[in-house]
Image (tube, helix red, strand yellow):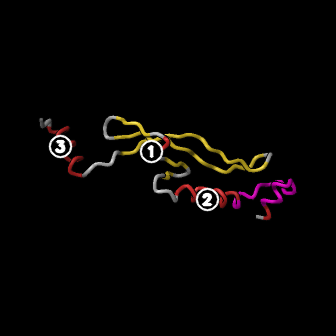
Amino acid sequence: MRDLEMFLAGMQPNAPLDTIQALDIVLRECLSNSNAIVQVGRSFFSDDFGRYNLDGGLDIWRGIYQSLCPTQMGLSLNLNTTATSFIKPVLVTQFASRLIGKYLQIN
């Protein structure tokens, strides 16, 4: 943390990337402890952020991307919106029934 203090005070030209990465991991850990949030890499997704139905058994979930970055003015917490697809949770029997019906044209 001393290297980070020196960098923020302008006494060290290079940002201590290992310290910044450790702080970034701590920030992500705080979010990932929630049962309502799904973490994928540096992104976090939740029903609270928005969930949209797609055909073919997929949902689009909205989320946030988080990273801690050194800037000329100090540290910056970068939060961006993001989205990704998730497979809808279904029972194996329902999935197999849909799959068989689709490929064998069973009515």
Q: Give yes or no for contact between labels 1 and 3 (Cβ–Cβ under 8 Å).
A: no
**1 or 3: mark nearer the eye:** 1
Q: Amino acid at mark 1?
A: Asp
Q: How many residues crowd mark 2 within 10 Å: few (<14), some (14–19), many (20+)?
A: some
Count all numbered tags in the image, as a single digit.
3
Residue lying farthest bottom?
2
Relative placement, left or right, of 74 versus 45 is: right
Q: How many residues crowd mark 3 within 10 Å: few (<14), some (14–19), many (20+)?
A: few
Question: Which of the labelled discs sits on residue 47, or is there none?
Answer: 1
Q: Per the image, is 13 magenta? A: yes
Q: CA distance from mark 1 to mark 3?
A: 30 Å
Question: Which of the labelled discs sits on residue 25, or is there none?
Answer: 2
- For the record, the magenta segment spans 4-19
Percent of width and height locating residue 98: 21, 42
Q: What secondary structure is marked by label 2?
A: helix
**2 or 3: mark nearer the eye:** 2
Percent of width and height locating residue 53: 37, 36
**1 or 2: mark nearer the eye:** 1
Q: What secondary structure is marked by label 1?
A: helix
Residue lying farthest right?
11
User: Sequence-wise, which precedes: disc 1 or disc 2?
Assistant: 2
Give the image quarter of residue 20. Answer: bottom right
Percent of width and height locating residue 86: 40, 45
Which residue is painted at 45% across and 41% down in the image? Answer: 61
Q: What secondary structure is marked by label 3?
A: helix
Q: Where the N terminus falls, by quadrant?
A: bottom right
Q: Amino acid at mark 3?
A: Ile
Q: Looking at the image, is 49 positioned above or below residue 18? A: above
Q: Which residue is mark 3?
A: 100
Q: How many residues crowd mark 1 within 10 Å: few (<14), some (14–19), many (20+)?
A: few
Relative placement, left or right, of 106 versus 1 is: left
Which residue is painted at 51% across and 43% down in the image? Answer: 63
